[in-house]
Image: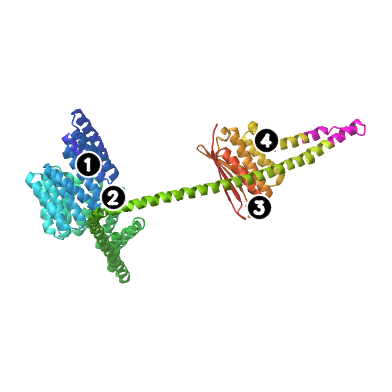
Amino acid sequence: MDSLKKTIRQSTYYDSTAVFENGQRAITIAKRLNDPDEEALIYQYYGNFYYFSYNLKKSKLNYSKSIEIAQKHKNAKIVNSTKIRLAFVLMDTDLLAAEKEFKKLLNEALKYHYTENTIEIYNGLGNLYDSRLMKDEALKYYLKGLKLAEKKGKKYHNAMMLNNIGLLKFNNNQVKEAEKDFKEGLKIIEGMDEFRLSLNLNNNLGLVSKSLKHYKQSINYYKNTLVNAKKLGFPLGRGVAFLNLSDSYLNNKDYMIAINYADSALSILKPFEQWEYVGMAYLIKSTIYRNLNNTKNAKAYTDTLFQLLTFHPSSNLEKTAHEELSSIYEQEGNYKLAFFHINRFHAISDSLSEMANKDNIAQLQVIYGKEKVETELENEKNKNSLLSKENELKQTRVNAIIVISIFVLLITIGLIYIRHVRLTRKQQQEFTSKLISNIDQERSRISKDLHDDIGQSLSVIKSKINMFTSGKINDISGMDNDVGDVIDQTRSISHALHPSFIQKLGLERSLVSLTENTQSKTGLICSLDLDEAENLELLNAEAQTQVYRIIQECINNTLKHAEATALKISITQHGNEFIVKYQDNGIGISDVNKSIDGIGLQIIQERAMNIKGKVQINTGKGKGYTLVLTFTQFD
């Protein structure tokens, strides 16, 4: 179990397989041993894994699972340690809230003598004050953690605190003091197989040695970093170690070795898309070739860097690239371009310094401004307690105002409702009147069709029969054609009145027939697209009839009012939803013919409602006419 836990804890966020495979094995062992505390720790490690993978959501979920198990089995120490990690997560979003949580957990850890937890809280508070630029306060907590770790013989925590103190000193330009702390931390964990901490300490010692210009010493430290990165299975760590080695060999003037390490860094960093580090590698290679007096290759790598910056901008890399180009052109004797690029370098440097100052000021304003607000809120609470009685008196008045307001609102709503009902009735009466008028017109049309077409045809047939029986003509062989025409005319009128043929032919064939007849009789170009409506024939008879009637009404409106030359009908299907779209290229519904076409549009709306559909119409003078019917219906 201990071996598995150590392996999980040491695994990096690039080694998820090892984390979860070993984690499941550890959980299985913990359950077999009936040891829920170990299970809670594994979920805590899962939370750590996700935290270092920058997946804060999953990190919090696993920490919560760890707390749940530990609380259920009353292990307050694990609950405390897991909440410490949640406080680290909170630091990413709210420093003041994290500070309160750390101090609350510190009181608990001190009360119950949770040594390791106490040290980790001191570490968290040190990190927190360091990020708030409160260096003295950060150092105070780091030293508390260091003193407790030394007293209790916690070697790992001792080295961890020395690493943090060293970084604080290094960033404060106390380089030699920082070096002592890093070396002491490295000595403490010697032989402990703490590869992650060893990697950090060696890397920091490499930075110190480089800043002191002890380049051979920095090479040794970076090689140790590389060894630890390999043990951790940490590809990115290896890539950065190669990059640091390349830079140290460059400074040590071992140019060919430096090129090899830069190439090794690029081979790892590119697949992981670590573009900032890739850009650094290009800069190192450019500097190497410039030092070798090969300015052609040097410029080629700076050009490659500028191409990279177009897709992955970085002000720091851009600044350094201009400085490198200035040095190249100066070496070539092109002082005009050298001057141009050094000016760009200084301009970007000044801009970055200004931005950094603004960010620091803004951060401090937010932090201290928030503290001021919290103090003011505390004062306001005291004032509020004095004003509570006055508010109670005011509340009675407010309640009376609310009751009156509600009463007025109800009366207003009632009046609006009555007006709406009256307006609706008036619209219904107008619709009924228009509908009756439209029915009368339709009856008149049918009467005319019967009289002018069928009546006239029957009169001709009767005349021929009379002439035949009276002997005036001897042949009535063409009579069957005349009777057939009458039958076709009758069928056409019957279909117009009630399209029963839809049930026989189906909606698709009926629409094909409708558009073909319209095109042949009127010359209007008709387009029909039904390819994307696979289940059209599964619609019930009512839906098919209403769709047919709506399209028929649209075509009639186009022929009567639109002055169009073409129309297009399409029916598409998205899941269970059907979309019928009708378009023409006519003059649209202008103010003149809007009243004429109003009854037709209302009838279309009524038909759509019958199949629980929605109709949307887009039109305007000279913009054509588009109707979209959307509905969902199967048998």
Looking at the rendered structure, the kind of residue marked 2 is Leu
**Left or right: 50 as drawn, with respect to 422:** left
In magenta segment, residue 374: no
Secondary structure mostly seen in the magenta stretch:
helix
Residue matched to label 4? 498
Q: Which quadrant does the C terminus fall into?
A: top right
Distance from label 3 to label 2 (Cα)?
70 Å
**Residue 88 appears in the rendering:** yes
Q: Which one is earlier in the sequence, the residue at label 4 or at label 3?
A: 4
Callout 3: helix, strand or loop? Answer: loop
Q: Camera-side residue: 39 or 422?
A: 422
Q: Which one is earlier in the sequence, the residue at label 4 or at label 2?
A: 2
Q: Which mark is residue 593?
A: 3
Callout 1: helix, strand or loop? Answer: loop
Looking at the rendered structure, the kind of residue marked 4 is His
Residue matched to label 1? 11
Q: Which mark is residue 288?
A: none
**Residue 199 appears in the rendering:** no
Looking at the rendered structure, the kind of residue marked 3 is Asn
Residue matched to label 2? 269
Q: Can you give x and y, in whole percent of width and height, for residue 625 in the image? A: 61, 50
Q: Camera-side residue: 488 or 617?
A: 617
Q: Can you give x and y, in whole percent of width and height, for residue 310 in the image? A: 36, 58
Q: Residues within 10 Å of mark 3 (few under 14, many from 20)?
A: few
Distance from label 4 to label 1 (Cα)?
77 Å
Which of pointers 3 and 1 indicates the residue nearer the eye? 3
Distance from label 4 to label 2 (Cα)?
75 Å
Q: Residue at x 66, y 33 (%)?
A: 500
Q: Residue at x 32, y 71 (%)?
A: 336
Q: Residue at x 10, y 49 (%)?
A: 146
Q: What is the span of residues highlighted in magenta in the rendered image?
A: 460-485
Q: Is residue 635 above or below residue 409?
A: above
